[in-house]
């Protein structure tokens, strides 16, 4: 099916179920042409015109899932013994020296594997937060851009930074921090080289000082100024743990949202990872400003950080999306599983009747698109980009299910059968086009072993 020409009209016909956010009937499927959705077909109807047909009668059709927070490099340190069973701060302090040994080929392998794993889970767009730039890895974002081009996902690559080392009261060791001048110069270079704000873009760039405990106020202010100059987005970790809240009060004399406001980040070009420990007034302020929140349920459970108040944030006006977070705190880059996890964790907070599978799918698609500031992806509607995922329900886990769309999450789907990005099939019959999975796994594992060996 990769042979379909750009001008041909492909009818993805009569899906078993379809997730849409519009009131219109789309049960007859979609028509794709030139990388976009050009027609939505009602039940029992046929398109005005089509050249090829894909029989989706055995598939649940959803918009491509969108991952709004990850650390691709961390796929190299999954289930690392020294970092097991720790809370966030000691966990980071254990891993910083390991991550400082990153080399270019290691990051390339890690990025390829993370993107491929995401793709297989039905993900078509992903944001990565890369903030480690040791002397051996000063061109990290360039490496990620190359890997993303190879795999074929849309990406938002965030130029992270750490400028507050242990000598100045921060958490990271001194040898992994950079100067403000270095960070800003590279940020400007990357925006100029890679950021594409046009409809259907494959690569966008955002600025992402890592966290309150790893960067200075100066770099937060300077990043906000640079982002405003180029109209790019801002991203950081915030309110992930109570330790972070205590750090902000001790270091800056402010709670996290007050700190965000003080450095000119409280606006709708900002999105935050985790967003757990906000009080009621802070939630209202975030919503009024349109600050986006990425919910990372598995990571938050693994580190026992807490539960993001998703429904309260949405009600206040904040866009909410989902992220798998780093593979060292999730150990998995599977977005359909993360969507299921988000549904169940939010039910634990709000009650089983207050959070539906439709809510969770909306967070992982339309919500995530809003978090990333995009209106061209995240929904199945005419004019949107042809990013979509199809899951079959042929596995034993689905036997006996009655609502196909609900079964996708309730019965635990874990791999898409077909995935399309920008009108091109990237996964067909559960296999990634042009990727030798065995070879990728072997090269990635070798890189992981080399990285771990550096600190042994």
Image (cartoon, grey):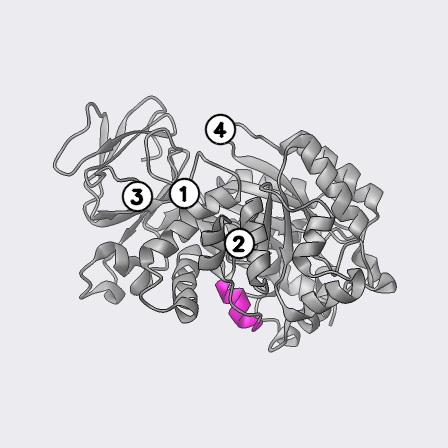
In percent of the image, x 65 and y 56: which residue is there? 257
* C-alpha distance separating marks 3 and 1: 27 Å
Indicate whether 45 appears above or below 49. below
Labels 4, 3: front one: 3
Q: Which residue is mark 1?
A: 433
**Location of the C terminus (image quadrant):** bottom right
Q: CA distance from mark 4 to mark 2?
A: 23 Å
Instruction: Identify the mark nearer the N-term, 1 or 4.
Output: 4
Q: Is residue 140 left or right of residue 352?
A: right
Which quarter of the image is occupied by the N terminus? top left
Predominant SS of the magenta segment: helix
Q: Residue 112 vs residue 26: left or right?
A: right
- Which contiguous range is marked in magenta? 297-304
Mark number, residue 88: none
- Residue 54 occupies which quadrant of the picture? top left
C-alpha distance separating marks 1 and 4: 25 Å
The CA distance from mark 4 to mark 3 is 21 Å
In the picture of the structure, the residue carrying the numbered disc 3 is 20
Residue 9, image x, y percentages: 28, 26
Residue position marked by numbered label 4 in the rendering? 199
Residue at disc 1, secondary structure: loop
Give the residue drawn at x 77%, y 51%.
Answer: 136
Residue 33 place in picture, x, y as percent: 33, 26
Tag 2 residue: 294
Do labels 4 and 3 touch, CB within 8 Å?
no
């Amino acid at each position: 099916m990769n042979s379909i020409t750009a001008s041909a009209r492909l009818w993805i016909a009569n899906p078993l179920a379809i997730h849409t956010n519009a009131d219109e009937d789309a049960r007859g499927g979609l028509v794709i042409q030139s990388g976009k959705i050009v027609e939505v077909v009602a039940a029992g109807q046929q398109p005005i015109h089509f050249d090829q047909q894909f029989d989706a009668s055995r598939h649940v059709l959803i918009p491509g899932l969108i991952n709004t927070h990850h650390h691709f490099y961390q796929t190299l340190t999954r289930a690392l013994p020294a970092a097991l069973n720790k809370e966030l701060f000691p966990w980071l302090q254990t891993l910083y020296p390991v991550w400082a040994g990153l080399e270019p080929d290691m990051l390339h392998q890690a990025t390829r594997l993370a993107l491929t794993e995401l793709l297989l889970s039905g993900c078509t767009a992903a944001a990565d937060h890369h903030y480690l730039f040791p002397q051996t890895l000063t061109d990290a974002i360039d490496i990620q851009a190359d890997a993303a081009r190879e795999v074929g996902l849309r990406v938002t690559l965030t130029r992270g930074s750490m400028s507050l080392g242990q000598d100045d009261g921060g958490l990271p060791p001194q040898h992994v921090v950079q100067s403000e001048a270095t960070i800003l110069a590279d940020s400007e270079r990357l925006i100029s080289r890679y950021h594409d704000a046009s409809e259907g873009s494959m690569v966008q760039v955002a600025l992402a000082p890592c966290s309150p405990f790893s960067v200075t106020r100066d770099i937060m202010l300077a990043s906000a100024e640079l982002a405003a100059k180029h109209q790019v987005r801002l991203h950081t970790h915030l309110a992930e743990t109570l330790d972070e809240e205590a750090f902000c009060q001790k270091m800056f004399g402010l709670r996290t949202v007050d700190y965000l406001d003080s450095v000119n980040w409280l606006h709708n070009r900002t999105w935050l990872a985790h967003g757990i420990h906000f009080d009621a007034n802070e939630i209202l302020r975030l919503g009024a400003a349109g600050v986006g929140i990425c919910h990372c349920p598995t990571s938050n459970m693994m580190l026992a950080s807490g539960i993001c108040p998703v429904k309260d944030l949405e009600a206040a006006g904040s866009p909410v999306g989902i992220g798998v977070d780093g593979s060292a705190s999730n150990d998995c880059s599977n977005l359909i599983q993360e969507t299921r996890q988000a549904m169940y964790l939010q039910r634990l907070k709000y009650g089983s009747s207050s959070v539906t599978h439709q809510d969770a799918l909306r967070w992982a698609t339309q919500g995530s698109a809003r978090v990333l500031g995009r209106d061209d992806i995240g929904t199945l509607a005419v004019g949107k980009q042809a990013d979509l995922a199809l899951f079959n329900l042929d596995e034993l886990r689905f036997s006996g299910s009655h609502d196909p769309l609900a079964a996708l999450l309730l019965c635990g789907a874990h791999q898409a059968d077909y995935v399309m990005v920008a009108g091109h099939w990237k996964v067909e019959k559960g296999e990634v086009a042009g990727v030798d999975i065995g070879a990728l796994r072997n090269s990635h594992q070798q890189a992981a072993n080399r990285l771990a060996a550096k600190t042994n």
